[in-house]
């Protein structure tokens, strides 16, 4: 079994209740990655849903949590012929830490109505990109290979960009095939794009994250682009796109995060 599958595994505890364990294998500076947590909560919803096709998942990150045991309480609050909707609350030490809401539908492989009014990201060849190194407490990068396009990697050496953008290539180090849960992780794995223009900051914690799933990728690598256009009152928004190597759209994301400048 791949490491990611072990780390999103859950065990039934009762009606609409599951036990899970938040792993430290997908952390950023010791804090579990938001996309990984979303995958864990979504796995609980998929256990209860009659549909296995993710349309959209939105998570609100209520308070910091640590790696360790958690409970996942699931509720089905709406259903129709084609869709159902669930909510999951992640509880640790008796306190709700994350709440996610997901919409799921029937599979629709026979549909052929894709329309893109935006092009996939133009990325430099991988051998010209900058590999994000493994770092203590940044265990996410122990488990994924991420190459940043040179246009957005200057902040590593103090060369800031005029544009708050992160783009590049990503895959699992274990070459695990992608599925919907892993796409949720990948859609939140890149460094915040604000770093490209502002440099390293002390903390950019996620307040809310929403990911809209388009398809399950069949390629080894994913091509990603994340952009911050607006920041005010200490909060920023981040819009993301995940594409496969065949230039097929995999997922889009929107995130609201706090911006806390390093002293």
Image (cartoon, helix red, strand yellow):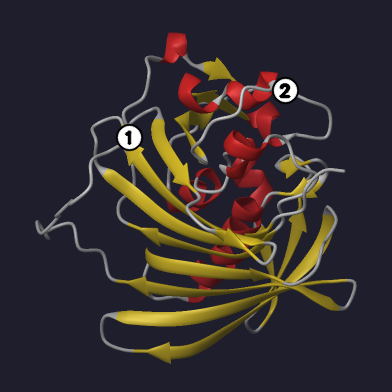
Q: Is residue 105 left or right of residue 167?
A: left
Q: Quadrant of residue 28?
A: top right
Residue 228, horizontal then vertical, whole percent: 50, 50
Of residues 173 and 230, the one drawn nearer to the viewer in this rendering: 230
Q: Is residue 240 above or below residue 63?
A: above
In terms of depth relative to the viewer, which is nearer, 110 or 151? 151
Residue designated by label 2: 134
Q: Residue at x 43, y 35 (%)?
A: 177
On screen, 222 above or below 256?
above
Q: Residue at x 83, y 28 (%)?
A: 136
Image location (x, y in percent) of residue 112: 9, 56
Quadrant in the picture for residue 235: bottom right
* Residue 103 percent across, percent down from the top left: 41, 75
Which residue position holds label 1?
A: 121
Q: In this image, 166 relative to 80: left or right?
A: right
Mark nearest the camera among 1 and 2 is: 1
Whether 77 is drawn above or below 61: the answer is below
- Which label was assigned to residue 33? none
Q: Position of residue 139 (x, y in %)?
A: 75, 34
């Amino acid at each position: 079994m791949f490491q990611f599958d072990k780390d999103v595994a859950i065990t039934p505890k009762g009606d609409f209740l599951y036990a899970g364990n938040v792993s430290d294998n997908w952390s950023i500076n010791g804090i579990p990655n938001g996309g990984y947590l979303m995958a864990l909560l979504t796995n609980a919803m998929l256990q209860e849903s009659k549909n296995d096709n993710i349309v959209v998942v939105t998570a609100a990150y209520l308070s910091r949590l640590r790696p360790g045991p958690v409970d996942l309480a699931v509720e089905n609050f709406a259903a129709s012929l084609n869709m159902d909707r669930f909510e999951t609350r992640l509880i640790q030490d008796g306190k709700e830490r994350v709440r996610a809401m997901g919409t799921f539908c029937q599979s629709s492989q026979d549909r052929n109505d894709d329309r893109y009014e935006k092009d996939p990201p133009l990325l430099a060849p991988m051998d010209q990109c900058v590999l994000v190194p493994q770092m203590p407490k940044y265990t996410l990068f122990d488990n994924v290979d991420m190459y940043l396009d040179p246009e957005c990697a200057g902040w590593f050496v103090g060369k800031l960009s005029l544009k708050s953008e992160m783009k590049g290539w990503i895959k699992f180090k274990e070459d695990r095939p992608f599925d919907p849960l892993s796409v949720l992780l990948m859609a939140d794995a890149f460094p915040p794009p604000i770093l490209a223009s502002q440099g390293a900051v002390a903390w950019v914690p996620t307040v809310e994250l929403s990911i809209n799933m388009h398809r399950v990728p069949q390629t080894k690598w994913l091509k990603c682009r994340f952009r911050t256009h607006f920041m005010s009152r200490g909060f920023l928004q981040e819009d993301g796109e995940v594409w496969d190597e065949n230039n097929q759209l995999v997922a889009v994301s929107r995130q609201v995060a706090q911006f806390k400048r390093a002293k």
